[in-house]
Image (spheres, rainbow, N blue to C red):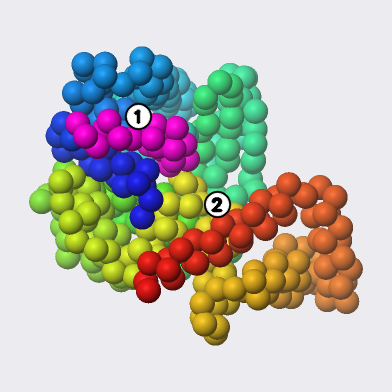
């Protein structure tokens, strides 16, 4: 595990636990590498919280530029949170005035469980709502200056407004075509919601159902392209603050129904391993399976990455070989250029209705990627090279 990854986890754990970071560790930080990693995982503010309490930052034995950079990141996250809260209130007030039921989701609730405001960065706000009023909400959002990114295409409508605002208004929690089991589970969604006491049309999940949905959402991100260290941090904070009050039998039953019980256990175990005790995180070696998962997490960033997908596919290819090699990379690249027909049918729905067109769509895909997505192709090849180098270094250590 790289030193900047260790620093990210250690400092985040210190912030959550309210522990002052070790002076020597802080003095030896490569702040450029740590900043880049923390930014990719939306965790600069939690790292900044820990660094601000350290002796080197208080006594200014590190450069003023470094102190200011981290300090600004925390106050920017705090300011953005306050702005999101104010803007969300305007949106929810409109729903109240127009009789539209709603329920804030995920990070909107989880951020309140952290030790202080601004510690958990927010890139968007998710709100479940009565989609009978989707057209009305679109008109309202656009009148407030939002750009409609997607509407009636997925299980949520997405609205963006500079400089920071990103709201996803959820018609349901999962799309039927992507997650049929989960879609069916949440079909009678409103029956799982509890009416708020202090308004007319607001609802919320119980903490048990909030946790179940959070795990399902995390699993979807993990499966599609990976998920970052903030997922572990959220999981730890949730369980540590609410665990003793939860109906765990109910949670386990529902997780089994959704086929995510094993994932939840693994996620919870790793979350406590990483964030429960900063001084003991790295005392014991991680086993190979956990090392693999942590590297997958490291390269995923907050929402997954090309590199994560490449890492997983190349591992799958290399299972039939003695480790990774240039042959692994070639097979991966060829697989990306010429995917299985099922992938073509999913990407080009017309080919599913007219199979004779599949060869045409293969050619179209290659031409489109070479002309329009050359940078993305270069990034995939670079990712494949980095993964080969990582595997090579890992093999050397194993010897």
Q: Depth check: 270 or 181 in front? A: 270
Residue 123 vertical position relative to residue 156 in the rendered view, above or below: above
Tell me where residue 92 appears, x and y as whole percent: 42, 27
| Labels in figure, total | 2
**Numbered disc 2: secondary structure:** loop
Q: Depth check: 127 or 378 in front? A: 378
Taking the magenta stretch, the answer to whether it contains residue 281 is no
| Residue at point 38%, 67% (across, down) | 397
Which quarter of the picture shows residue 149? Answer: top right
Q: Which residue is mark 2?
A: 305
Mark 2 neighbour class, 10 Å CA radius: few under 14, some 14 to 19, many 20 or more: many
Taking the magenta stretch, the answer to whether it contains residue 39 is yes
Q: Depth check: 351 or 104 in front? A: 351
Q: Which residue is mark 1?
A: 45
Please give the range of residues in magenta: 23-46
Label 1 vs 2, first from the N-terminus: 1
| Quadrant (top left/top right/bottom left/bottom right) for the N terminus | bottom left
The residue most toward the bottom is 320
Q: Depth check: 100 or 30 in front? A: 30
Left/right placement of residue 189 relative to residue 157 reads left
Q: Main secondary structure of the magenta part?
A: helix
């Amino acid at each position: 595990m790289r030193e900047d990854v260790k620093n990210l986890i250690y400092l985040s754990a210190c912030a959550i636990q309210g522990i002052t970071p070790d002076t020597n560790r802080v003095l030896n930080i490569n702040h450029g590498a740590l900043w880049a990693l923390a930014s990719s995982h939306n965790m600069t503010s939690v790292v900044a919280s820990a660094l601000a309490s350290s002796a080197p930052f208080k006594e200014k034995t590190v450069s003023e530029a470094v102190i200011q950079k981290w300090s600004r990141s925390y106050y920017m996250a705090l300011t953005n949170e306050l702005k999101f809260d104010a803007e969300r209130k305007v949106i929810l007030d409109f729903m109240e005035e127009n009789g539209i039921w709603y329920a804030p989701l995920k990070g909107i609730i989880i951020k309140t469980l952290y030790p202080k405001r601004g510690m958990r960065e927010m890139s968007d706000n998710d709100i479940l709502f009565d989609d009978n009023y989707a057209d009305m909400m679109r008109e309202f959002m656009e009148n407030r200056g939002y750009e409609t990114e997607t509407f009636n295409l997925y299980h949520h409508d997405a609205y963006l407004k500079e400089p920071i605002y990103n709201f996803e208004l959820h018609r349901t929690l999962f799309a039927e075509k992507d997650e049929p089991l989960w879609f069916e589970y949440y079909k009678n969604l409103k029956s799982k919601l509890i009416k708020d006491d202090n308004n007319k049309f607001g609802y919320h999940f119980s903490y048990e159902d909030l946790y179940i949905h959070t795990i399902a959402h995390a699993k979807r991100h993990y499966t599609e392209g990976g998920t970052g260290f903030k997922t572990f941090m959220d999981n730890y904070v949730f369980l540590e603050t609410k665990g003793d009050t939860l109906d765990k039998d109910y949670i386990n039953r529902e997780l089994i129904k959704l086929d995510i019980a094993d994932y939840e256990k693994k996620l919870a175990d790793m979350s406590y391993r990483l964030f429960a005790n900063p001084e003991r995180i790295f005392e014991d070696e991680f086993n190979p399976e956990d090392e693999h998962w942590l590297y997958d997490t490291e390269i995923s960033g907050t929402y997954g990455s090309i590199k994560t997908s490449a890492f997983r596919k190349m591992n799958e290819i290399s299972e039939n070989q003695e480790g990774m090699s240039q042959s692994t990379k070639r097979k991966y690249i060829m697989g990306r250029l010429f995917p299985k027909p099922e992938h073509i049918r999913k990407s080009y729905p017309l080919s599913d209705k007219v199979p004779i067109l599949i060869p045409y769509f293969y050619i179209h895909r290659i031409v489109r990627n070479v002309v329009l997505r050359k940078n993305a192709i270069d990034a995939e090849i670079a990712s494949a090279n980095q993964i080969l180098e990582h595997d090579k270094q890992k093999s050397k250590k194993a010897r």
